[in-house]
Amino acid sequence: MRTRTMMLWTCVALSACGDDGASLPDIGLVDSGTDAATPDGGQPDAEVVAPAITAVVPTTLAVESAARVEGSDLAGVTELSVGGVGQGFAVEADGALAVATLGSATPLGDQEVRAFVGTTGSAPLAVTVVGPLSIAGAVATTATSVRLTFDRALDPATVDPGAFVIDGLAVVEVAVDGAVITLTTDPQTEGASYAVTAAGVRDTHGHGLTASSVREALFPGYAPMVPQVTEVDPTTVVAGHSVLTLRGENLTGAAVDLGGVALPLVAESATELEAGPVPASATPGSAALTVTTASGTSSPFTVTVLEPFRIESAMATGATTLEVTTNRPADPASVSAARFVIPTLTVTDAVAAGTTLTLTTSPQTPGASYAVGADDLLVDAQGAPVTPASPTFTGFEPPFPTHFVVLRVGDGSGPLSANAAPLFLERRRFSDGTVTETLALPAVSSGANHGITLPGAGYSPRLQGSLTRSPDGRYLALLGQSDAVGAAPVAGPRVVALVDAGDFATPAGLDTTTTLGTSLAGGRPQGAVTDGTTVWAVGGGTGILSTPVGSTADATEVSASPRDGRAVGIFEGQLFYSASGSDGSVLTRVGTGMPTGSATTEDLFPAANPIGFAAFDLDPAEPGVDTFYVASRSDGVVRYVKSGGTWAASATFAQSQTFGVACYDELGDVVCVAVAQAAGAGELFTFRDAAGRGAGGAMTSLATAPADMEFRGVALAPRP
């Protein structure tokens, strides 16, 4: 997750922020971050050209040093990140991005640079990040020479005798060999304490010393038998893992100390020691490494100690996605699905981005407790394996719905009749029923999209207009007719309207290209549901039909009975529909799952005048759906519960002439909104069923349809 970062520059020239910086032009402050997308509808910025990064200068970046990012379409960049950490930057005259000081929180090692305009990001560009240039150690190798070691190679052009100061000694000559500087000095006093200080030098990438650099090293005057450490590899170690190699002189019989912790010896000779591993208890940060023999103790050599590599936390970000956070970046080459184990779930993919590992899992059970572990083949940039740990996380639970959608018939321009009327979808708040968005459905065909209407008033028309939400919550589905507004109903194609959550209330989110061909042309269009690729529909005179999204051919008959379907829905991966006609008034299960071809139906229970419904799996002892809330034209909303495999009505939420209901589970309670025609034009009601097993009772009025309008179906608001 990206965070909003603002870095206030206190200088406009690099010389004001570190040694020997080149001047930059005057620049303004730039907000370098964007808020992360929110779960309830954040989308990539529309019509935003993604920035592109072609080069970062230098390619090896140093913390607290300057950098320049080159590319195209960078002028509007709002966020720049290195290793997932936001950076302060300014846009230069040629469109490049200038970073005055790379943030101290930037992770070291191989990282990615990305630029964002809003939430639209560039492709990543790989760079290497190193710490501030520092002195690692100093040792007198003769009575007139001192070996000074930096943590990386220096640019010889920046090294001269004037760059080094030793109190009590004159530096008369220097020689450069990568990271090692040999200083020729005045004769040293044996055993005397000296300090050497550096200034003005730069590494081979142009990075100088900064405020956090180690600029000074202590060493005793040359004594022939005192142990001397001239090289340590590596200089960045991981507690509990790393083994160090020390090279120098007079090392036989030495004891190695790192920050006050003794390191076990693996191998030794007069010129080389192998010691480690570094204990897991070693304190993270800079530590002095020394070697002690009977003749004395070596000059300290600075080593950076990193804490053990570990997984710090895990959080489900979707029904099949999990974000695992580590205390520092993993080596991307070691990241794969095979590295992770989550009991009862299958990990199918793993992607690394800085300290965040995004895992793709099999579907999680909402609210269930899981633990994620990783094997020792998951390593960091230093090759240190992840420590054993199994942080827990909770199976993804979508946020509670805050809105529902109701189908409104009529625009208020005149009284409704049995003739075709325009349709509108109103997005309303659960809290008070107020309208927040309205989407007008097309009444006239345009291109591949068909016009869709429904009769405006009357008993039979009120049975039409059932509204459903897809199993993944993304789409709304509605079945209507193709009659022009004001026209008497005719036996024309039945039209399916699909609304995409990502574009609700905009034409881009509406699709009316699907029809049922000649199927159901002579019967009432009652209800439809979709999973995004297939539409299932029910209506007067038929059983249940299926057709691909976008098809205009005749639909496939999944089952011919029961006839006269009223509403259809998918719950817990299973297709159901209600029917009331010559085959009885029943709630029916269709085959197994969501069949698109011929399937056998099973009547679960008889219901009085059933129309819309919602279903839940509330009882762990009963497999699959065990609770239905059925909108009954005669009784209100009736709750049916399965116990011991037998269905029975167990409570009624009374309100006459109820046609539709939509419900969700809120911490065990079932919260519902229902549509009824008690007020003639239509009224919205709400109720809460405690633990899904309350005693029933009256509903609470939420809103009434305005004059010359009616409410029909209702569904939970779609979500991306």
Image (cartoon, grey):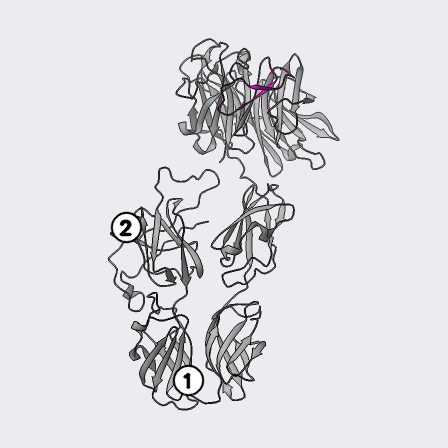
Residue count near mark 1 (Cα–Cα under 10 Å), binned few <14, some 14–19, many ≥20: many
Which residue ends up furthest to the right in the rendered image?
644
Classify residue 131 as left or right of residue 75.
right
Mark 1 — residue?
140
In x, y percent, where is residue 418?
49, 10
From this view, report whether residue 472 is shown above or below residue 311: above
Residue 602 lies in magenta, yes or no? no
Secondary element under disc 2, as helix, strand or loop, is loop
In x, y percent, where is residue 234?
48, 70
Mark 2 — residue?
95
Comparing 554 with 501, the one in front is 554
From this view, report whether residue 564 is shown above or below residue 154: above
Comparing 146 with 38, the one in front is 146
User: Distance from label 2 to label 1 (Cα)?
Assistant: 50 Å
Q: Which residues are magenta?
A: 541-564
Q: Amino acid at mark 2?
A: Gly
Residue count near mark 2 (Cα–Cα under 10 Å), binned few <14, some 14–19, many ≥20: some
